[in-house]
Image (cartoon, rainbow, N blue to C red):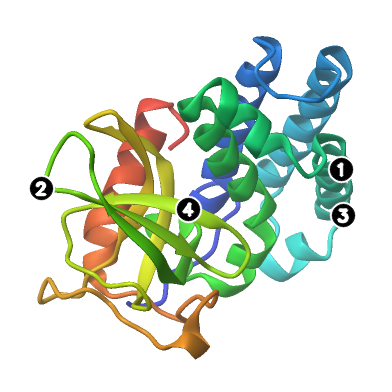
């Protein structure tokens, strides 16, 4: 991928964080974030959104942004939010509603990994607006409603995700994965997609790669994942 110029006002990673915080506020206002005080959480999210919007409008260079008081405030408030959630929020949310739980996980992980992706992911590419990591297949089972698909349980050594795919993989395989908003595939919500190169082949790795992010992505990743994320941000009037 060619090098592109960083701008806080147009960066897809920051735009996606704005989108995710908006979704998180919606979930808070409807009482769908488990284990937190609704009123206090809404106030915290409003402050967090205000800081993020100031970051977006700042026009800082990337280095200046990451070392700014704005970014420090963002990180501190985000840590406060995550500590309020506790350790069992996903399990509790999933017992109530699978879609909400997986949406919560997507938006929380997206805003939490913003700093890392600003530092490590390629500038100016919409695929950088989400977490892309190598994952290991730890369980494989048939889709209960559609034999075309398999349910893959994968891990980046931090989290276990569920991916619905028609790709043929085996337990122990390591592949590149993009964490995406939950998508209903015949009654089960997939949390992302396995990524492929220009030839349509899965991008594979080794056990040593699990949890890591490539320095660059093939253009095929931008054409698939990037295009989908760009459409999402366009529909939200964020780009």
First of labels 3, 4 by sequence position: 3
In front of the other: label 4 or label 1? 4
In this view, 42 is above or below 125: above
Real-space Cα distance between discs 2 and 3?
A: 47 Å
Quick check: 103 left or right of 195?
A: right
Real-space Cα distance between discs 2 and 1?
A: 40 Å
Residue drawn at x 35%, y 51% is 163
Give the percent coordinates (x, y) of residue 89: 71, 35
Q: For mark 3, what is the residue?
A: 72
Quick check: 217 left or right of 10?
A: left
Report the front residue among 105 and 44.
105
Real-space Cα distance between discs 3 and 4?
A: 29 Å
First of labels 1, 3 by sequence position: 3
User: In this view of the protein, can residue 19 be seen by the observer?
Assistant: no
Mark 2 closeness class: few <14, some 14–19, many ≥20 residues within 10 Å:
few
In this view, 4 is above or below 68: below
Circle 2: element type: loop
């Amino acid at each position: 991928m060619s090098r592109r110029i960083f701008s806080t006002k147009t960066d897809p990673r920051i735009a996606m964080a704005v989108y995710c915080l908006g979704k998180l506020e919606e979930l808070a206002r409807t009482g769908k974030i488990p284990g937190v005080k609704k009123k206090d959480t809404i106030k915290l999210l409003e402050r967090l959104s205000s800081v993020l919007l100031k970051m977006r409008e700042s026009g800082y260079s990337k280095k200046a942004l990451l070392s700014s008081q704005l970014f420090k405030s963002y990180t501190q408030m985000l840590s406060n939010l995550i500590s309020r959630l506790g350790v069992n929020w996903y399990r509790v949310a999933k017992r109530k509603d699978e879609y909400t739980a997986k949406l919560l996980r997507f938006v929380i992980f997206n805003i939490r990994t913003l700093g890392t992706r600003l530092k490590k992911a390629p500038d100016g590419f919409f695929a950088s607006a989400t977490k892309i990591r190598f994952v290991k297949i730890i369980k494989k089972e048939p889709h209960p409603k559609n034999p075309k698909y398999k349910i893959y349980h994968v891990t980046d050594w931090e989290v276990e995700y569920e991916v619905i795919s028609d790709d043929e993989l085996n337990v122990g395989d390591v592949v590149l994965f993009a964490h995406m908003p939950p998508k209903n595939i015949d009654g089960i919500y997939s949390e992302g997609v396995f990524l492929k190169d220009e030839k349509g082949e899965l991008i594979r790795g080794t056990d040593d790669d699990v949890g890591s992010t490539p320095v660059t992505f093939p253009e095929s990743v931008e054409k698939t994942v990037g295009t989908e994320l760009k459409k999402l941000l366009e529909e939200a009037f964020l780009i």
